[in-house]
């Protein structure tokens, strides 16, 4: 690894550590929905392939089992073709609803939904408990800035 890349990597890691420490010192819980959580995970889904959808749902379920419902706060943010996971008629709806019942949040990029509506003439019906966000990638950036760890399975 070149020295410049190594220095940049160290700076990024240090910056993230400082953000996390600053949040802990502030005394407010990172998550309102899970105030006692110790781990904060944001899963990104921007792909509509069945294998990717299954993988993201499996990762969330496995982590809930591993850490326990109250110890980890998980959000799955969908954008691009990944929003298809949140279509009301998705075959994984039962698994999605089960994860939601365990506290996992699912956010949907409304920029993508609006683009789909413009190009097809139809607005897809979404899972009724999905959380609309204006811009999926901006939402991810905001959550990472708050201290969430981003994973792109």
Image (cartoon, rainbow, N blue to C red):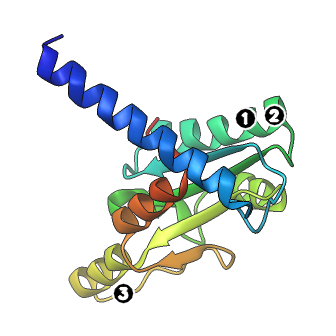
Tag 3 residue: 122
Distance between mark 3 and mark 2 Cα atoms: 40 Å
Above or below, comparing residue 80 to residue 148 in the picture? below
Which disc, if any, is residue 63? 1
Few, some or many C-alpha atoms within 10 Å of disc 1 (few <14, some 14-19, many ≥20)? some
Residue plotted at (32% across, 78% down): 111
* Above-or-below relation of 48 to 13: below
Residue drawn at (21%, 81%), measured in percent from left and top?
119
Q: Quadrant of the N terminus?
A: top left
Residue to which mark 2 is pinned: 67
Is residue 94 in view from this perspective? yes
Task: Give x and y (percent) for residue 107.
Answer: 54, 67
Find residue 73 and report its horizontal and vertical position in percent. Answer: 71, 51
> 125 and 10: which one is in front?
10
Residue 63: where, in percent of width, then height?
73, 35
Contact flag, marks 2 and 1 (Cβ < 8 Å) = yes
Of discs 3 and 1, which sits in the foreground? 1
């Amino acid at each position: 690894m070149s020295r410049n890349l190594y220095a940049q990597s160290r700076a990024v890691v240090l910056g993230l550590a400082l953000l996390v420490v600053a949040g802990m010192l502030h005394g407010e819980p990172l998550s309102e929905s899970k105030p006692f959580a110790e781990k904060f995970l944001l899963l990104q889904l921007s792909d509509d392939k069945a294998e990717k959808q299954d993988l993201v749902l499996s990762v969330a379920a496995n982590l809930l089992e591993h850490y326990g419902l109250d110890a980890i706060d998980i959000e799955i943010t969908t954008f691009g073709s990944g929003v298809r996971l949140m279509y009301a008629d998705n075959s994984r709806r039962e698994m999605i609803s089960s994860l939601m019942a365990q506290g996992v949040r699912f956010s949907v990029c409304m920029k993508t939904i609006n683009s789909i509506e413009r190009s097809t003439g139809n607005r897809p019906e979404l899972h009724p408990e999905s959380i609309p966000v204006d811009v999926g990638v901006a939402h991810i950036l905001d959550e990472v800035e708050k201290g969430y760890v981003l994973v792109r399975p």
